[in-house]
Amino acid sequence: MVIVNHQSTGDVCTLMMCLQDKGTVVRKMMWLMDHVFKYTNFGLVSLIHGDFFIRQGKAHRDKQLVYLKEHLEKYYHSRDRKWIVLFPEGGFLRKRRETSQMFAKKNSLPHLTHVTLPRLGATHIILKTLSAQQENGSVGSNTGTRNQTVNKSKGLQWVIDVTIAYPKARPMDIQTWIFGYRPPTVTHVHYRMYPIKEVPMEAGALTDWLYQRFVEKEELLAHFYDTGSFPPPEGQKEAPSRQMTLDPVWLCMVQSFAFASGYMWYNVLQYLYCCLF
């Protein structure tokens, strides 16, 4: 399970680029995204891919978690998914910061500026639904033992905590990625890995664990904005890093597809509008 801080629509693009040289990861990944993206040009692709679109807001929260659980049970293993990505903050930093800080003050929680307090719901459902698969299978027969081994290999094994940092705290959105109207910039991505056995499953303990991860993200980002780099691990002078440069031909093909699909989608919407009105 990959948990990521959320500053703008460009976070998805950044993460996708980071995973392009990781073999079959992108093909075996399930995304959780806002339901608004269902109505974009890549919404149909995501639907076919088996991603989950979640509606925000208290009025939809409980029902959406039920839908998420059903979706995971139906599609995650049947489509041989190995990774799942979510943004626990439940919205963009600029939209949630004030509300998050008010909630933190009211409940004596940490005051965060560069991230917001994460929401538990989707994270808890994912862990309970996908980690619980590791315990399936009936022990005591050869068949049961085989099933247990297979399910263990399919269950979540790691939580990867990803922190995305943009220079000068100026996040890029999808429009910037497509049209390139901002000067070239280097986006920094920091990650930590936690074995699933170290992640608590009980709601209260998981909430504390998740809050602590985002307090750490706050510290990482504060250091990055002050110094231009992430802090080094304990005992080291600098944080090890690997520069990633993508094939420009591949990027050109992706951009061409984005323009073409966007143009087709716009024309479809225009046609439907004319038919209806």
Image: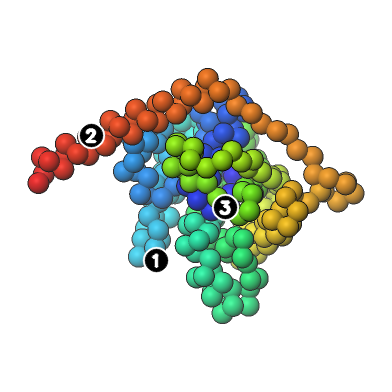
Chain-order first, disc 2 or disc 3: 3
Q: Position of residue 211 (x, y in %)?
A: 64, 62
For residue 149, side relative to residue 219 (left or right): left
Residue at image coords 35%, 49%? 36
Q: Secondary structure at mark 2?
A: helix
Which residue is nearer to you in this view: 1 or 217? Answer: 217
Residue sticking out furthest to the top: 249
Q: Position of residue 31 (x, y in %)?
A: 48, 41
- Asked which quadrant contains residue 47, the reply is top left
Do we see residue 10 in this rendering?
no
For the residues marked 1 and 3, what is the alpha-carbon distance in whole angstroms? 29 Å
For the residues marked 1 and 2, what is the alpha-carbon distance in whole angstroms? 35 Å
Q: Position of residue 192 (x, y in %)?
A: 71, 46
Residue position marked by numbered label 3 in the rendering: 170
Residue at image coords 52%, 46%? 172
Residue position marked by numbered label 1 in the rendering: 58
Which residue is nearer to you in this view: 95 or 205? Answer: 95
Bin the neighbour count of mark 3 within 10 Å (Cα to Cα): few under 14, some 14-19, many 20 and up.
Answer: few
Chain-order first, disc 1 or disc 2: 1
Of marks 1 and 2, the one in the foreground:
2
For the residues marked 2 and 3, what is the alpha-carbon distance in whole angstroms? 32 Å
Q: What amino acid is labelled 1 in the image?
A: Lys
Q: What amino acid is labelled 2 in the image?
A: Asn
